[in-house]
Image (cartoon, helix red, strand yellow):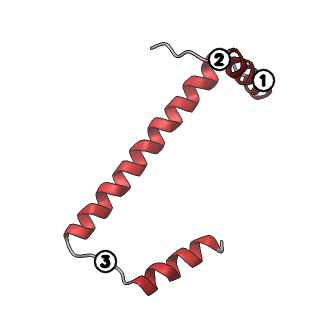
């Protein structure tokens, strides 16, 4: 697979790679792999939520708001 970047993007990737002490190609490869792993986790979570909803496993609005407030206050 080949990916094209603008000269400005290549320069920025080169700067980041230099700071990280890796080759720009390795930096891009690592970032792509992290994206794939994150996407897999996200999709698994969505599937789990859909399965739970299909089974009637819901929480009421007050519980949802309490959970979100707790997450955001951490």
Comparing 60 with 22, the one in front is 60
Where residue 48 appears, x then y in whole percent? 30, 60
Residue 15: image tag? 1
Q: Going from the N terminus, do you reach mark 1 or mark 3 first?
A: 1
| Coordinates of residue 37 in the picture (x, y in percent) | 46, 40
Image-based side of 35 in relation to 7, left or right: left
Q: CA distance from mark 2 to mark 3?
A: 47 Å
Rate crowding at label 3 as few (under 14), some (14 to 19) or many (20 or more) other CA atoms within 10 Å: few
Are the residues at dot 1 and dot 3 in contact (C-beta closer than 8 Å)? no
Question: To which residue does mark 2 refer?
Answer: 6
Q: Residue at x 36, y 49 (%)?
A: 43
Q: How many marks?
A: 3
Q: Which mark is residue 58?
A: 3
Query: Residue 13 location in percent, x, y?
Result: 70, 23
Mark-to-mark CA distance, 1 and 2? 14 Å
Closer to the N terminus: mark 2 or mark 3? 2
Secondary structure of the residue carrying numbered label 3: loop
The quarter holding residue 51 reads bottom left
């Amino acid at each position: 697979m080949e990916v094209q970047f603008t000269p400005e993007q290549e320069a920025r990737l080169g700067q980041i790679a230099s700071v990280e002490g890796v080759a720009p190609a390795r930096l891009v490869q690592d970032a792509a792999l992290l994206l794939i792993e994150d996407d897999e986790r996200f999709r698994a979570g969505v599937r789990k939520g859909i399965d739970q909803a299909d089974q009637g496993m819901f929480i009421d609005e007050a519980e949802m708001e309490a959970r979100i407030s707790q997450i955001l206050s951490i």
